[in-house]
Amino acid sequence: MSIEVKRLRKRFGRMEVLRGVDLAFATGRTTAIVGPNAAGKTTLIKAILGLVRPDQGSEVWIDGTRVTGESGYRERIGYMPQAARFPPHLTGREVLSVLCRLRGAKDPNLELVDLLGLEPHLDKRVGALSGGSRQKLNAVVATMFRPAVLVLDEPTAGLDPRASAIFKDHLAKATGAGATVLLTSHIVSELEDLAEDLVFLVEGQVRFHGPVDDLKAQAGEAKLERVLARLLEPSP
Amino acid sequence: MIDLLGTIVVKAGSAVPTLSAALALARPHDTVVVEAGRYAEPPIEVTRPVVILGRGRPVFVGRGDHTVIRVTADSVTIAGIAVERVLPSNVAEPSAIRLDSVAHCRVADVEVRDSFFGIYGSAVESCLIENNRVVGPGRSEQESGNAIHLWSSRDVTVRGNVVERYRDGIYLEFVTGSRLEGNRSRDNRRFGLHFMFSDDCLYQENQFSRNGAGVAVMYSKQVRMVANRFEHNRGQAAYGLLLKDITDSRLEKNVFDANTIALYFEAANRVEAVENHFSSNGWAIRMLANSEANVVTGNAFVGNGFDVSTNSRSNASRFDGNFWDRYRGYDLDRDGFGDAPFRPVRLFSLVVEQNEPSLILLRSAFVDLLDAAERVLPILTPETLVDRRPLLAMPGRSR
Amino acid sequence: MRGATRRIIATHATNVGRSRWLLVYTGLLALAAVLLVWLGGSAARALVSLINVVLLLVPLMAVVFGTLYVYNAREFTELLLTQPVERDAAYFGLVGGLAVPLVVAFLVGVGVPLGFAAFSDLTILPGIVALLGVGTLLVLVFTAFAVALAVRVEDRAWGLGAALLVWLVCTVIYDGLILLLLATVRDRPLEIPVLVMTMLNPIDVARIQLLLTFDIAALLGYTGTVYERVFSGLLGRSLAVVVLLVCAMVPLLVGRFWFRRKDF
């Protein structure tokens, strides 16, 4: 599923967070959105998800159809926020079942539940779960409907290394099956592992968009960390 | 026609077809028995001491413009009959039965229907009016007379009557040393009981309900009112009991329930109100500043809009040892009285006094705050109107 | 109602229903009702004492609990909005999911003890109905206010403050202003303006309905007659219910407008 944003602008009061972003994400590619703090990464993601209403003139296109406020396109999107807080007095199983019913999904993919060892915790109240377990639940929620688009905001930040590895494997499987992935992360190794393409945002504008390899070649550096460090240097 | 015992029987179609005919025949202390039927006669005058008894409740129907039966002899008894149809008049006070300057008469078990005045006594003495049922047609106040009306009389007992839908249910003027007991007076246009210039009377166990202006007691001394019920007297100027120029009287064990103003003192002095029960009234007691030396003690105040209101900061009456449901104090020394005094006059009652529309704010949190502030620091409410020994339990009721 | 809205209501309602605070709240209401019935001597007096619970405490609870819940549920609302769920469904789901348990808590806490009391004294039944009806409508009104404000105001401290201010205005300040008006403008008849003013404040509308149920004699004297004519009787009752429903609808719809345009 392809995603396209055209002239995306968003202003919060006097702060202009996105200043005309034009991007196209190709089907089946994994793109990392990178930039300094307050560059507009989260706003960009939320605009694509419909959580943030872009300003007049902005356009978001999913699979060749323009998104104008209806919710149907989100059928095929999975989202994993940085830290999800589910209703604390529901059990994990109840959360999953509500979401299934809202989607009308008969056959969710609960592979990750087993892989991450979440099963024994599913009947506890979410409020009683550890941060790690909650993040695992979060990962399950994002992937259980086999989405064509996965939007991940700092996905492995709250996961332990083992869960993190399992999740990445799971992700690789999904992209192998043709899923488009957008992710933000501060963990360079994660970007190195996952990202094929990279969007570099600064002050609400796109500084670079293209394959990670191209960027490395342009910069003449083999390591992404170096490249990013250079990009983040204050411009002369 | 007259048997040996002196009994005359009145029966339509017989030799004595009318009461008038029987009375013409009767000797003093004869008995006239009137058989059931309807009797339309000219005005009937009872001028000799006789006993008139109805059998099967005969009905005397007036032409409309006159008193139906007028008694001018002492020791007359009238019982067991019904009287109807006396129309309103502007000049006279035509009634169903009128007693004129007589003594030792008795009117009992008489039913009066659709009559301008019901039972009317003028200058009577030692008479008994009991167990009658006087129900008016419910005309307007101008077109209604009084159900039981006594003027300038003494030593009269009015007992067990039901009086409804007149101007005043029971009206007494210049009546002394009389008793009113167990009467039920309701739905009268003006007062359920109205008496003026009537000293030394006792009112006991009567029930006054739904009267236009309740009960008014005026210009009298030594009145005792015991165990009466005043209820549902509501309206712009409706009082459970209005006391005006009353002195040296006593109210005891009466119940005042759901009246607009339950008990109203205007220039009432040395009245003792003891062990009465005030519940669900708009105002339980309203005492104007011209009332002095009254004593209010041992009463219960429950669920009233305002417990006590007045029109001045000065107060010359004593409130002591009453039960107030608004009282929130404790009794640490366990003597049955609250340790802190209670001020029954709310600031809000003064506000309403000055500004009637503000009544709509009753029970508002803002008003409660105002009242609380005033209670802590009284500035506007009468300083001396305070119950220093508020009861903690409702009198006559164990906790 | 659409299926999604119903499911979201059920989800929030379950979550709220299992919260300890709601349980404590229900218990306190029940305790107050039981104590008042038991200590007050008669159920009729307990009803009168419960007027303040219904007019002050119940709206306060709706306002405080409602605002805080909306802030706490923010991430879950976000998650819902990344699902194929319309904003209206998420919004009405949130309002409904809050209002239902709050109403149930109120009806159980106050209604059950009074229901038992009614067994021994049937005459208090109309009073109970009035108290529960008015209370339920007030829960709806103030829940709607709470949600709307929490949706609009990003900062939770400010949002809670704003909701408390609405409560304070409705319960205390507004009546103070009416009294001030009455005190300053004395030479003109003010019954009608005051009547209209009270119609605009849900707490006043509720209070006057309870007043007419419990203090009718006081109102019937004096000016009360004018108010009595307008507010009592079937017409007055219906008018009050309509006004209270409008008082709930306005914040509900304003809140929906804000929710639709909100950036999460």
Image: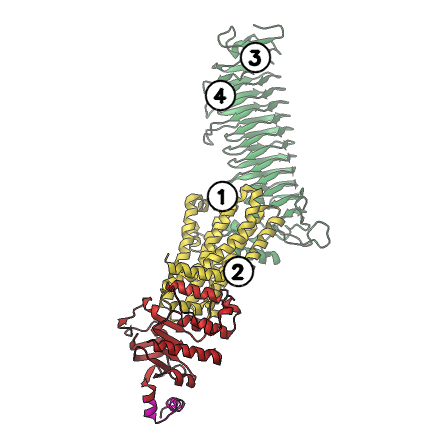
Residue that mark 2 sits on = C22
Q: Closer to the camera: disc 4 or disc 2?
A: 2
A217 inside magenta stretch: yes
Q: Which mark is residue C24?
A: none
Q: CA distance from mark 3 to mark 4?
A: 19 Å
Q: Position of residue B217 (x, y in %)?
A: 58, 35
Mark 4: which secondary structure?
strand
Q: Closer to the camera: disc 1 or disc 2?
A: 2
Residue that mark 1 sits on = C220
Residue that mark 4 sits on = B84
Q: Which mark is residue B33?
A: 3
Amino acid, disc 4: Glu
Q: Position of residue B285 (x, y in %)?
A: 59, 44
Contact? badges 1 and 2 (CB < 8 Å) = no
Contact? badges 2 and 3 (CB < 8 Å) = no
Q: Which chain is yellow?
A: C
Q: CA distance from mark 1 to mark 2?
A: 40 Å
Q: CA distance from mark 4 to mark 1?
A: 35 Å
Mark 4 Cα within 10 Å, few/some/many (few <14, many 20+)? many
